[in-house]
Image: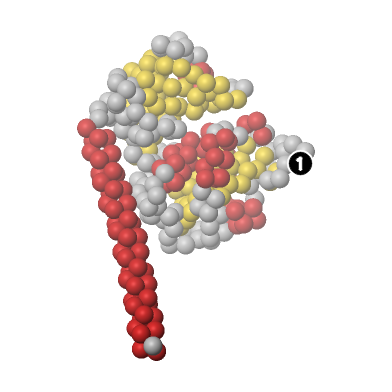
Amino acid sequence: QYVRQKTYTTRIQVTKERQSNIGVLLVAGALALGGAYYVFNKQQQETEAAQRNIALNNDWKDFVLEETEDVSADTKIFRFKLDSQDDIVGLPVASCLLTRAPIGDDDKMLIRPYTPVTGDEVPGHFDLLVKEYPKGNMSKYIHNLKPGEKLSMKGPISKLPMHQNKYADIGMIAGGTGITPMLQVIKYLLNHPADQTRIWLVYGNVSESDILAREEIEALRHKHPHRFRVHYTLDKAPEGWTHSEGYMTKDMLKRRLPPPGYHNKILVCGPPGMVGAIAGPKNPDYTQGELKGVLKELDYLPHMVYKF
């Protein structure tokens, strides 16, 4: 009887081990199939994208304004149509495009750069987020456009080539419409499951109503809480405001940005005065210029900083 009971117990143990091994194999198989599907699906998407027509080809081209959307009292989203619903704008990350328009009595062509807030992930159109400035001739021209009218554009103009896991941490310092190139990078990295880059955004504005794309920023922050940190600062903070008030200080940026490091990058974009105080002005020919200001005081090195 003892021998029979022992044999029965051993068979149960062997059966359990077999079941456990089968479970492991099933899980491994499912993961392998999932990985294979992801690779296949990504390759299929890349093939489909390669087969689409690309709108930007480094020549000036007129794009038709399809519609506008009010974002704030002085800021709108301008949606421009592509030739086909399957076309893509053709904008590598991070890059911008140039706008051109006849300004003044002599119809002299004024050229200004803008960064679309949508990219190749959205076929058929692209969006520009444009704030109208009192002395901004191009921004006024764009704000006066009506649906059906055209704006001449050219690109892409490559700025800072980006790919998955290029940096461990990216700190972003943005002011006003300087958020647009940041959004391009943020969405590109967070929408790639394989990317693990941590993003730290410090975004300054005059008032709470001036915070552009806040709804989209907050949605991304809630979706990626371990990879995307956001801090706002306002010149005029309302009562009960839980973020910062005033200019971006050395202490604020030290606490809200990743530390200096070989695998980290700090991106800066905003009004010239802000960029100059934070990282030093760009050169007259729009090259990077010497690193100065708050970031230099915080021991960042020139290769760790990029000014849009």
Q: Residue 114 vs residue 140: left or right?
A: left
**How far across and down, in percent of the image, does residue 92 sit?**
33, 39
Q: Is residue 38 above or below residue 156?
A: below
Q: Nearer the viewer, residue 211 or 114?
A: 211
Place residue 122 in its image quadrant: top left
Say which residue appears at 25% left-offset and 46% top-offset.
40
Amino acid of disc 1: Gly
Which quadrant of the figure contains the C terminus?
top left
Element carrying mark 1: loop
Q: Nearer the viewer, residue 124 or 29?
A: 29
- Image coloring type: secondary structure
Q: Residues within 10 Å of mark 1 (few under 14, many from 20)?
A: few
Image label count: 1
Q: Residue 143 vs residue 239: left or right?
A: left
Say which residue appears at 27% left-offset and 35% top-offset.
49
**How far across and down, in percent of the image, does residue 163 sit?**
35, 49
In the picture of the structure, the residue carrying the numbered disc 1 is 240
Say which residue appears at 25% left-offset and 35% top-offset.
48
Q: Residue furthest right?
A: 239
Q: Nearer the viewer, residue 153 or 294?
A: 153
**How far across and down, in percent of the image, does residue 298 sit?**
57, 59
Q: Residue 298 vs residue 10: left or right?
A: right
Q: Can residue 243 be spotted in the picture?
A: yes
Which quadrant of the figure contains the N terminus?
bottom left
**How far across and down, in percent of the image, does residue 100 sit?**
38, 21
Say which residue appears at 53% left-offset and 57% top-offset.
258
Place residue 11 in its image quadrant: bottom left
Q: Residue 256 vs residue 102: left or right?
A: right
Q: Can residue 272 be spotted in the picture?
A: no
